[in-house]
Amino acid sequence: MSGFGSTMEAGVPSARSRALAVLRVRSRALAVVLLPAAVAVVLVTARATGRLTGGPWGAVTLAVCAVAALVLLLGGVFAAVVLRAGPAVTPTVPLAEAAAPDLYRLVRDLADRMGVPPPSAIALTPDCDSWLEDRTHAAHRRGGIAGGPQSAPGAAPVLVIGSPFLWWMRVAELRAVLAPVVAGTGPSAHPDIADARGFVRGLDAAVDVGGRRGLGWIAAPARLLLRLCRTDAAEMERGVAAAASDRAQDVDYGLRIVAQEQVGLAYAGWDRLLTRVALPAWRMGRWPAHLDAGVVSALTELSRRDRLAEGFTSRLGERPACDLLEQPGAIDEATSLLAARLFHGGPAEAGPDWSPVDWAAYPEEVVDRKWRTEAARLHAALDALTGPAGSPGSPASAGAASPAGSAPAASMTPAPTSAAGAAAAAAGSPAASGPSGAAGPATIEASDTAPAAGDAFTGPTLERVLGCLANAAGEGGLGEALAGRLSAELAREERAAGSAGKARGADAVPLFPLQPPRSGRDLLADHVTAMVCCAAVDSAGAAPGMDWLDGPVLLVGGDRRSDLAPRVLCLVEDGDPEPLREWLSALGVRPEKPVRLV
């Protein structure tokens, strides 16, 4: 302790001086509150000793005493809010020592080697970052940190570790990455720095409390004090970080350079896994239960594709940091559920409409369902704009021919006018879905004998989509109207899902949203792609698949087809269906054959 203090004093003296500057702001605020009371005491004393008699001094003394009492009352309430308000605490998964004794031992060894106190507890966050979080400001009043040891004023902060690091990094790399973080526990024990940090956290909490409860007289002075000490607080934290970095220089310095490369790689793979793979599942009420294990597969695939990362896969023979956990599978599931809450706003617990999904079941239970849901939404929008398929005036009733020149080979009842109706119609057919909700075989088979030329194709067919969007690009066209319809429908569904999720304990808005809102054109392209994939699965023997970096993919003969997107864009943006028709013909996809919707 004293060793770290002397190092900090000699290496970064500005940290303590900045902390004292923050505390001076607190002292001045206290002086302002006490000033009217001091004036009142002087006046009362002067009146009692006969030095101020007659004239207006009686009224002045009374008025000053009233002002002093009011200021003291308001100042006391403000101080109580600052002292008692709990600052925002990052949602994490607590990791008790019994669940990770080897990890606690590693952290304690680091702390002993650097001469700093060990963290009071360890927690995991579903993100690629690690930091120290001081939770003692309010924890000692609430009986300790949830899932951790009892906290008391001055206790060491909690070490928060990014869970992807544990699965991707090797033990030695994790040790090198955590060294400068753990070194930061030293300044937390310095009285001036700890006091200054507590004051700033209290002000921040007071601003939040005043804003939420409409108490402007609390939020306004708290904001003023934060502005007055903002620069000094920021410089104090920079000095603390510099001192911690200097303290950790001698701990695995050479390995830290290599480990930092792994941090960047982990962030890239984690971001792709969340946005491309996890997000489609979250949107339909499923959450991948082993995201951290998935990041290993995603990063291994990224290393295989990127020639700059060729040597990274050789690391997989070394001991992974997740071996430091007693039950890595259970911890992975807990952090995966927290990731869904933070990045999507899902419930804090699993339920009937919020169930986990394993990676092996992902293609059937997520990818296939996603495609068929989007295909149903696309046909519902077409029904709303053009009338149900086969009805008078709809493009489908004009006797559109297949690419071979013959009429479509199937006829069925008009499609329902909503996605829910389409799903109900499909569910009413035999073998609409398996026991687990996975896609079953197609329920609508084409007739072996083609109808006479001029007969209308009806129902959810890809041919109907091609016919409607051909030459319909541009503003004011059917494509633009369809894109707007899809955007409105998705917004309505998201509002309904948000209301239902809030009722069952979900966060209405994610704390860290992954993607900005998509444009109507992008949504239309996604839905047309989903319809194409459904047709390929139902009529050409294709299968849904998952790519660790790109998410849902179409597999033909076991190989991923990545050449579909530009052909869909030609149809959606230019109204040209020919590139897509050629692609369908090469794969043997029958666009006139009705597809099963879910």
Image (tube, rainbow, N blue to C red):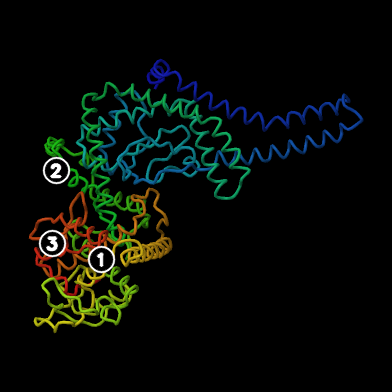
Q: Which mark is residue 583?
A: 3
The CA distance from mark 3 to mark 1 is 18 Å
Q: In the image, which is nearer the foreground, mark 2 or mark 1?
A: 1
Question: Quick one: label 2 or label 1, which is nearer the N terminus?
Answer: 2
For residue 471, which numbered disc appears in the image? 1
Q: Dot 3: what SS?
A: helix
- With respect to residue 175, does 327 lie above or below? below
Label 2 residue SS: helix
Image coords of residue 315 (percent x, y): 14, 36
Judge left or right: residue 485 versus residue 570: right
Residue drawn at x 60%, y 27% is 27
Give the image location of residue 254, x and y in percent.
21, 24
For the residues labelled 3 and 2, the Cα–Cα distance comes to 26 Å
> Which amino acid type is marked by label 2?
Arg
User: Relative to the observer, which residue lies in front, 426 or 104?
Assistant: 426
Quadrant of the rendered image containing residue 398: bottom left
Comparing 119 with 206, the one in front is: 206
